[in-house]
Amino acid sequence: MLDLSYEAPKPKVIAGAKHDWELVIGLEVHAQVASKAKLFSGASTKFGAEPNSNVAFVDAAMPGMLPVINEFCVEQAVRTGLGLKAQINLKSAFDRKNYFYPDLPQGYQISQLYHPIVGEGEVLVDMEPGIARLVRIERIHIEQDAGKSIHDMDPNMSFVDLNRTGVALMEIVSRPDIRGPEEAAAYVTKLRQILRYLGTCDGNMQNGNLRADVNVSVCLPGQYEKYQDTQDFSHLGTRCEIKNMNSMRFIQAAIDYEAKRQIAILEAGGEIDQETRLYDPDKGETRSMRSKEEAHDYRYFPDPDLLPLEIEQGWVDDIAASLPELPDAKKARFVKDFGLSEYDASVLTADTANASYFEQVASDTDGKLAANWVINELFGRLKKEDHSIEESPVSPAQLAGILKLIQKGDISGKIAKELFEIVYTDGGDPAQIVEDRGMKQVTDTGAIEAAVDEIIAANPAQVEKAKANPKLAGWFVGQVMKATGGKANPKAVNEIVATKLGQ
Ligand code: ADP
Ligand code: MG
């Protein structure tokens, strides 16, 4: 694999009234495992089902029901760990996190506090070509999701939907290595991309399948670097945690607001209370939800219903061997094999569907030409109709067909765009369409010369002007292109016009 060399971005600096401040951010991302069944029951995880229709007895915490671990979910956590180059712990264990909530009928959440299944890993967060931040992952643990309380359907009652209760989540905890709002969004974007490549989480943020708790503190410039290599960040500023963010835009806005709020308090001589806050997108501000609870508030203890989770190295190795090519490797390969810019390679590897489409086109044509057409023409056209690449009416083979005609000199770039539109709307074989509609470029210099002669003869005044001012030759080129229905080879026309005008 190629290593793309990169430089770390500068941390975001926020000017205070007294001096500058820097941001320190750590994220806890909850990613729903792409599993059809829940973590400890066979109930379906299908989104949008009739409320309380996907609830097994164990999800509803009926007396005497026992959880049974879903091996597929464990496999996805291991896969995710391997994809984040993380330590896989062959022994892990489940703990009960006790708290009362109407949509948590057990009265506790089954999670992994003391022995998570995945240890330290890393995510390379791309900011712009050549600039990236390596964000360290502290751990990934598996846990149950809670249900959903609905407070806005009735003025007097609240409702509870237990469909989501017991769905498997992977909680991916980062070190506080993120240094600005844009970086935080880029981190979530990259993490989401890796999860989608791995197939372990669908990354659908709108449905809440990927959400982030965002921890924010501020410090004096240079402070973070002092503690960067330790795992103890308690000497940095006190942090607040903004819960349950599921939009990249809101994550950035919330961090911005939160940083300014903390700076104002600190500069006025106050102290930051470590607390859990909620972001209100309508007001664009965060507000306190509860004071920060400590691990001991939850009375964590090992879940007596579940044996410690032991997995075998051989099984982990098999999963490792089945990992797909991941975004960084794919991007590096695209740069190397197809001669693409890092930017183009990033766009084309944003998801596997784009990447595979491009590769099919490029395998048969020129890489740069293919990248240019996929990004500018195809993506642009699909976007107009809000279509995904899977819905593209132009197949990779058809697009490659168009590009081959350009490469052979059969059609100009301009005609190629017309041809693309025809294939997009009517379908068909590009070479056949060019043949049938007589769209082939005229490269026959005799025919072009005749057209040039005709226009020169008809426009003596223009000829005099062009002889005095060579820039006006363009007018003749335009006329010839018009007369030939855009089919004349533009390079040949330029040359012939220049010669005939004596330039
Ligand atoms: P707790 O055990 O109280 O939840 P953790 O140490 O597990 O605290 O940290 C939770 C999250 O907060 C992690 O993502 C971590 O990176 C982040 N974090 C820790 N210290 C800070 C800090 N000073 N500023 C911002 N984020 C922080
Ligand atoms: Mg924690």
Image (cartoon, grey):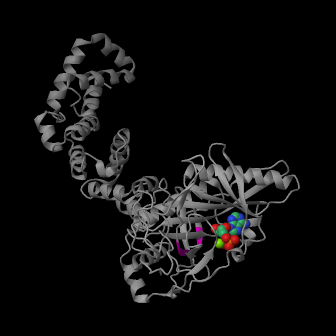
Q: How many marks?
A: 0
Q: Residue at x 65, y 79 (%)?
A: 300
Image quadrant for the N terminus?
A: bottom left
Q: Horizontally, is 396 left or right of 21 in the view?
A: left
- 317 in the magenta segment: no
Q: Position of residue 156 (x, y in %)?
A: 60, 49
Magenta residue span = 135-143
Image quadrant for the C terminus?
A: top left
- 136 in the magenta segment: yes
Q: Nearer the viewer, residue 133 or 318?
A: 318
Q: Nearer the viewer, residue 126 or 92?
A: 92
Q: Position of residue 309 (x, y in %)?
A: 49, 86
Q: Residue at x 41, y 68 (%)?
A: 198
Task: Specify the quadrant of the image occupied by residue 338.
Answer: bottom left
Displayed-image quarter of ligand 2: bottom right
State whether residue 130 is above or below residue 412: below
Q: Nearer the viewer, residue 203 or 319?
A: 203
Residue that extends furthest to the right in the rendered view of this protein: 269
Task: Specify the quadrant of the image occupied by residue 98.
Answer: bottom right
Specify the principal SS of the magenta part.
strand
Residue that extends furthest to the top in the rendered view of this protein: 461
Task: Specify the quadrant of the image occupied by residue 56.
Answer: bottom left
Q: Residue at x 44, y 81 (%)?
A: 68
Q: Position of residue 249 (x, y in %)?
A: 57, 49
State whether residue 473 is above or below residue 2: above
Q: Is residue 177 visible?
A: yes
Q: Residue at x 57, y 55 (%)?
A: 185
Q: Position of residue 81 (x, y in %)?
A: 49, 75
